[in-house]
Amino acid sequence: MNARVWHVQKRDIVVLILCAAFLTSTLGVVGERGRRRAKEIVCQSNLQQWAGIFQGYVDQNGGTFVSGPNLSPNWWVRNLKEEDKDWKRARIWFCPTATTPTNDEKGKMASSLTSFNAWGIFQGTGFGPNGICGSYGLNGYVIPILDGTRYEGGMSASSGWRDLLNVPSADCVPMFTDALRFDLWPLHTDTPPGAETLPWSSINHMRRCCINRHNGTVNCLFVDGSVRKVGLKELWTLKWHRSFNTAGPWTKAGGVWPQDWPQWMREFRDY
C-alpha cells in the first residue's frame, strides 16, 4: 500500500456520490441498467471511503494493517475503532445490492440465502454494542500473524503482506471486496461455485467473493488504494498472497478451458 496513492480525495468521493444520486433520480428513464450502475457507483464509493479508513490504521501501525490483543486472522474486526466496526453507524459496510443480513440481531435466519445477502450480524465481546454486519470481506493475508503460525487454509505467516507501504504491484493485491464473509483466504486451487444462486457454505474461500453482484464482476479495493470492478474469472489472477500462483489451474495461462467453468460463469470474460 503506497501511502502516496492511498490518499483518498474527498472531492472524488463527493463526485461519486453525486453521480449515484443523479443516476438514481433518472431511474424512470434508464431502467434496470441505470439502477445497477447506480448501485455499482455507491459500492465503489463505499470502498473508496474504506481506503481512507484503512490507511489510518496502516499509518498508525507503521505499515501493518492492525495490531492489538485480538490480533487473529478470524477476528480482525475487533481491532477497529468503535465507529468503524458498528454496522448501524458505518453504513459503508454495505454494497447496495446486498443489505439483508443472513441472520438478524436475534439470530433468526433470512428466508433465503443468496449472493445478494449481507453476512450475518456478529455480536459479543469486541464487536461493539450493535455488533458488526456488512457485505464486504477483507483479504486475510494483509493481517500480520506471528512467525510459525498459519493462516486459515494453511498458508504460512511468511506468505502474508506485512508492510503494506511496500507491496510490489500493489494494484494487483486485493484489500477489501464484495464478499459473503468479513474475511477470506483464497488459494489458487480453489474451485468456482457450481451455481450462481449457491451461497458460500464451505472452506473454499474464493467462493466467498466469486459472487455475481455486478453483472459478472465484483468491486474491489486494492492495496494501492485503487478501486475497480474485477471479473469473476479474474479473481484467480490476482496476487492474494506472496505465494499465490496467478497462472494457476483456473487461469488461461494455467490451461483452463471455457467449458471447464460452471455453466453460469461461461459467458463471462476469460483471464
Image (cartoon, rainbow, N blue to C red):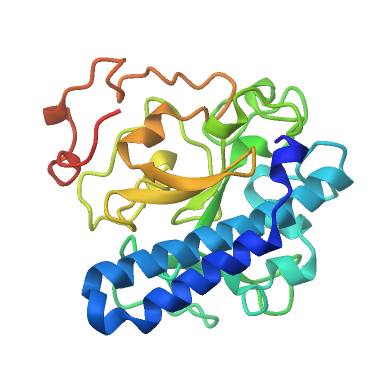
Q: Judge from the rendering whether residue 20 lies leftward or rightward of residue 111; answer left or right.
A: right
Q: Residue at left 54%, top 71%?
A: 17
**Quick one: 183 or 111, which is closer to the camera?**
183
Eyeballing the image, is 151 above or below 61? above
Q: Position of residue 173 (x, y in %)?
A: 56, 33
Can residue 155 be seen? yes
Q: Position of residue 137 (x, y in %)?
A: 53, 52
Eyeballing the image, is 90 above or below 143? below
Give the quarter of the image for residue 198.
bottom left
Can residue 117 be seen? no
**Quick one: 112 or 161, which is closer to the camera?**
161
Eyeballing the image, is 267 above or below 34? above
Quadrant containing the N terminus in the rendered view: top right
Q: Position of residue 72 (x, y in %)?
A: 71, 45
Give the quarter of the image for residue 50.
bottom right
Q: Position of residue 44 (x, y in %)?
A: 50, 58
Quadrant containing the C terminus in the rendered view: top left
Q: Residue at left 69%, top 51%?
A: 76
Q: Residue at left 31%, top 20%?
A: 249
Q: Judge from the rendering whether residue 196 lies leftward or rightward of residue 223; answer left or right.
A: left
Q: Judge from the rendering whether residue 231 lies leftward or rightward of residue 134; answer left or right.
A: left
Q: Judge from the rendering whether residue 163 lies leftward or rightward of residue 250; answer left or right.
A: right
Q: Residue at left 79%, top 64%?
A: 81
